[in-house]
Amino acid sequence: MKTMTTIALSMFAGVASGQTFSASATGTQSILSDGPRAGGNTPFFHNAQGSSNGDFAGYAASDYNLGGTGFQAGFDLDSLQFDVQQANAFFTSSGALNFYVASASNSFFDLTYAGDDVLANPGGLEDVAFVGSGLFIETATGSQDTFVFDFDGALDDSDAENLIEAALLNGDSLRWVIAAATPGTSATYGGLDNFDADAPVLSGAFSIPAPGSVALLGLAGIAARRRRG
């Protein structure tokens, strides 16, 4: 499946506007207690199933290559959006979800499911950080769920924001994790190579001071000092 990473910029004096990035998943897996489902041979399964789902309890993991976005120091993440399409089955069940980011420095094969709370039981996830919560409501295969997270509020300067911004700045890959927040949740989403649903997409918006803004701030400071003098 074709993957993409795009960035769009529109600058004006002060703060740049309209900056966005978008990356489609380069890898997807359902992580169970013994590792990736079916030995990693089923990337089209991208499920988050709570602890009451027996041998199929696990979380969904997807990786995104953020290289080539051309980020430079000084930008600030404003929001993050996760788009994913449902791929439902007879065992699909609506319920609450938690979302996390983690470093993608290791392989899916290094991961295991050790419980629904991946902060307490990371199961091989590295630098995992909580992003937010949402609801999976079963509709139909192919229908898109969109989850948006505001990084100008409680998530500002959080571990999650710092990890995402570092990945964008360094051109690293980032791992996105969906875990059931209740034992009975069985959120069934499409991953790579799914015939009925597109691969997940991670996108976001950010701001960065325009080149003239720092100079303008400096001039304002000088003027203020002169007035006080």
Image (spheres, rainbow, N blue to C red):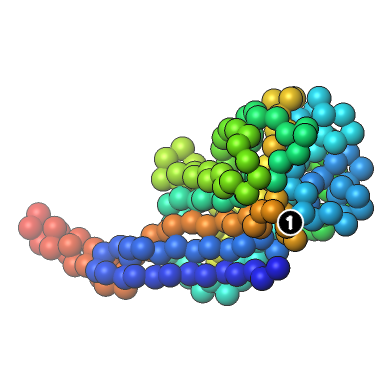
- Give x and y (percent) for residue 3: 65, 69
Could you say where residue 101 lies in the image, as x and y percent from the top left? 64, 48
Q: Is residue 109 left or right of residue 220?
A: right
Q: Please tell me how many numbered marks the rendered image carries.
A: 1
Between 229 and 118, the one nearer to me in the picture? 118
Q: Which image quadrant for residue 51?
A: top right
Q: Place residue 105 in its image quadrant.
A: bottom right
For the question of whether residue 75 can be seen, the reply is no
Relative to 146, 205 lies left or right: left
Could you tell me which secondary element the residue under label 1 belongs to?
loop
Q: Which of 54 and 106 is in front in this view?
A: 54
Q: Residue at x 45, y 44 (%)?
A: 150
Relative depth, front residue between 21 and 195: 195
- Where does residue 48 sit, x and y in percent of width and height? 73, 39
On screen, residue 64 above or below 93: below
Residue 113: percent from left, percent from top: 83, 39
What amino acid type is highlighted by mark number 1?
Asn
Image quadrant containing the C terminus: bottom left
Above or below: residue 33 compared with residue 224: above
Q: In this view, does 207 lie above or below 84?
A: below
Question: Which residue is at a point 77% across and 34% down the rendered structure image?
Answer: 90
Q: In the visual, does 53 lie left or right of 17? A: right
Residue 198 visible from this viewpoint: yes
Residue 24 falls left or right of residue 217: right
Quadrant of the frame with the N terminus:
bottom right
Residue drawn at (40%, 64%), measured in percent from left and top?
19
**Neighbours of disc 1 within 10 Å: few (<14), some (14-19), many (20+):** some
The residue positioned 57% from the left and 51% from the top of the image is 83
Residue that badge 1 annotates: 194
